[in-house]
Image (tube, coloured by chain):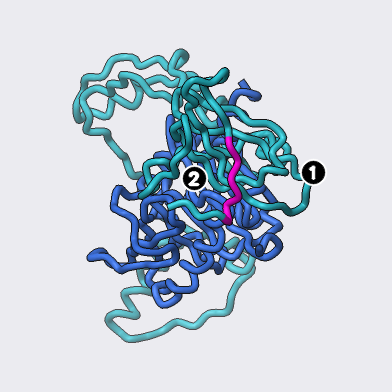
Amino acid sequence: MAEKKLLLGYLTVEAKDNYFRGAALVTDGRGIPVDFRYTEPVRPTRLERILYGGALDIYLREEVILENLLSAIETKPVLWLVDDVELIRPVQKLAKLPALMLEPTQRSPLETSGKYESTAEEDVFIFQADNISAPMRMSLSEENVSKVGQIVETLTAAAEDMELMEPFSRIAKAFEAVADSES
Amino acid sequence: MARILSEIGRKLSRIFLGRIVVRALDDLHRSAPARIMTHFHSVSVQRMRVEPRVGAAMFVKWSSVRIVGAGDLLGGQLQKNVKVHSARFSFVTKKKKVSRYKLNISARAGAKSAMMRIQRTPITRRNRINFLKSPPKFERSTLLALYSPIFQEKVAKSALDKASGNLLFWYDNERVKAGEKYHLLLLRVFEGEEPLKWLWLPAAKRLS
């Protein structure tokens, strides 16, 4: 259907084993990669850890990795999906596009695909992306709550041709492949 | 002597008689050089410390400093007894450079493009059979797995991960620009030659 226009962005920042790295993948409406960027692992030195203190984590995630990735991406998606709720605000601020996080649930499916419900949690919704899966939990920023209907419509359209969360697993595999090739 | 007596007489006459003798400058006075007298006060500074004790100093090499005795608390002898022949100062700053640390983490996180790598990474479909409210029925076979949606004509290669039950496949992006999407079903066949069978069903046929 909307292969040309419906582009989804996937963004992840990984922090483990004393390093930080990130990746951004833009796919078309079928999940086919259109643009993919990743950063080398950034290992802050002991001195940098001392100098930056508690601000190091935020600085590396938001100002170093996200900024680099978002400025490098040449194909802009219609929205960004992130895998950490802490990334919603900075991604939205830097990319000037809606950013949201999806999580699978164990709930029974809603009546029809495209249906959504608010939850007891602020800025969190449950929505049914397609008719053969469990509903998804969607976290938005406060500014995008008013656009939730439009966002759900976009995601439901994409879910007809792809699995919405699947590209994150490809990013993880690509990270492994990069690490293997460098070791 | 005569001059001194004359001077005394002049001063006394000034005091008691109020006379001021005005004389012309004679050659002697004229040629006499002006004499400026100043007073010099010598200030003597005495140290009050009993004994100078120096354990160690990082920035001074004391090898050639000789300290001879101490004693004489107030007698001013201490200064005389302490003979400093030479003291070579070698500062740490000369030996060790103060290095400048450049904080530039951002430069180490340059974003790289890796399209080839991500295109070589397989796409995954998980088994969705558990979400079917009424699974379709088949003759002499039963449904084991359902993978959807997949653009059949674009699939270049596929593999079933038996451990996770996920289907891995690669799209050939050059093969077909657009195509129909399908459900891929895995069936267990009873009394057949092959125990497993793959079946493509158009995704337009809604399964629920």
Residue drawn where x is 51% and y is 52% of the image = A164
Residue drawn where x is 40% and y is 40% of the image = A50
Identify residue for label 1.
B175
Quadrant holding the N terminus of chain A: bottom right
Quadrant holding the C terminus of chain A: top right
Residue drawn where x is 44% and y is 28% of the image = B164
What x and y, as percent, mark residue B135?
41, 44
Image-based side of A135 in relation to A172, left or right:
left
Q: Is the C-beta separation of discs 1 and 2 under 8 Å?
A: no
Image-based side of A182 in relation to A13, left or right:
right
Identify residue for label 2.
A13
In this view, the residue in front, B180 or A177, is B180
Q: Residues within 10 Å of mark 1 (few under 14, many from 20)?
A: few
Q: What range of the chain is rendered magenta?
A: B199-204
Query: Hue of chain A?
Result: blue
Q: Is residue A82 above or below residue A46?
A: below
Residue drawn where x is 29% and y is 24% of the image = B78
Q: Is residue B37 above or below residue B25?
A: above
- Residues at marks 1 and 2, common chain? no
